[in-house]
Image (cartoon, helix red, strand yellow):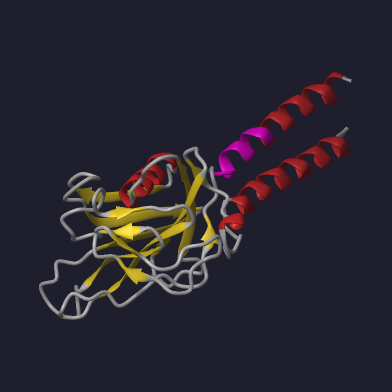
């Protein structure tokens, strides 16, 4: 009886451990096929990269966005934030105009990534901000080079990004297989952003796995305990 209960306890521990591993975002992204967290529906696909450059083991993460018709970079960012309970932003204005992003936070398992733009009062102490980079699609009506199903190696600084007057239409408009990247890093005194998204990106996981796994493990233990001691 005790041996049977011990085996079931070991099974429960494995279930919880599996949940913890799944929340660790271990999948490296080389293209759309590696993205596991998709938001929206439609025939068009775009990728969103958020790179914290914070020195942690994993610091850059990817989400996917699907849509039909016309969608802006702001549409994708806000849809992903709404769908992922571990991701949050601080922003001002509206998606179609005057959109200004100042802070992004993401809870990756037990690791918190959180970076906020500085006040730009002194250089170089607080000349840090979220830079906006794009591949494919259009920005302010002009085509942006690149795009495709693989992770970009070269990014273009968006002219319709964090500090621009228009982020949505007629700002940054997505095409099928375009990419958006938000990258935290230093600016120079001319406010040019210096840190583009890194080449090593990890897939964000759709749901936190630890709590559901723990609930399943507890259910197994309760059921098994009743069966064992009733026999």
Question: Can you name the residue that lies furthest to the top here?
Answer: 230
| Front-most of residues 96 and 90 | 96
The magenta span reads: 208-216
| Residue at figure coordinates x 26%, y 74% from the top left | 193
Spot occupied by residue 135 in the image (x, y as percentages of width and height) = 40, 64
Rendered location of residue 114, percent (x, y):
34, 59
Would residue 53 appear left or right of 128 to someone viewing this image? right
Q: Residue furthest front?
A: 142
In the figure, 221 relative to 35: above or below? above
Answer with the quarter of the image where residue 144 lies.
Answer: bottom left
Q: Is residue 214 magenta?
A: yes
Horizontal arrangement in the rendering, residue 189 relative to residue 203 (left or right): left
Observer-nearest residue: 117 or 65?
A: 65
Which picture quadrant has residue 118?
A: bottom left
Is the stretch drawn in magenta largely helix, strand or loop? helix
Quarter occupied by the N terminus: top right
- The residue at 61%/60% (across/down) is 27
Question: Which quadrant holds the C terminus?
Answer: top right
> Residue 82, image x and y in percent?
38, 40
């Amino acid at each position: 009886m005790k041996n049977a209960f011990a085996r079931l306890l070991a099974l429960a521990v494995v279930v919880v451990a599996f949940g913890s591993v799944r929340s660790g975002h271990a999948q490296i992204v080389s293209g759309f096929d590696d993205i596991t967290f998709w938001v929206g529906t439609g025939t068009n696909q775009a990728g969103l990269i958020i790179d914290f450059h914070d020195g942690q083991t994993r610091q850059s993460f990817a989400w996917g966005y699907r849509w039909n018709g016309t969608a802006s970079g702001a549409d994708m960012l806000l849809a992903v934030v709404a769908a992922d309970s571990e991701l949050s932003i601080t922003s001002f204005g509206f998606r179609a105009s005057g959109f200004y992003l100042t802070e992004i936070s993401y809870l990756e398992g037990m690791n918190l990534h959180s970076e906020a733009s500085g006040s730009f009062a002194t250089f170089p102490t607080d000349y840090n901000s979220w830079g906006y980079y794009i591949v494919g699609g259009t920005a302010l009506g002009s085509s942006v080079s690149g795009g495709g199903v693989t992770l970009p190696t070269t990014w273009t600084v968006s002219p319709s990004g964090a500090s621009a007057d228009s982020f949505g239409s007629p700002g940054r408009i997505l095409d099928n297989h375009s990419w958006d990247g938000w990258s935290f890093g230093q600016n120079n005194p001319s406010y040019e952003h210096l840190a583009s998204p890194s080449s090593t990106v990890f897939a964000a996981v759709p749901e936190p796995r630890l709590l559901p796994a723990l609930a399943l493990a507890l259910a197994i233990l309760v059921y098994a305990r009743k069966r064992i001691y009733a026999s």
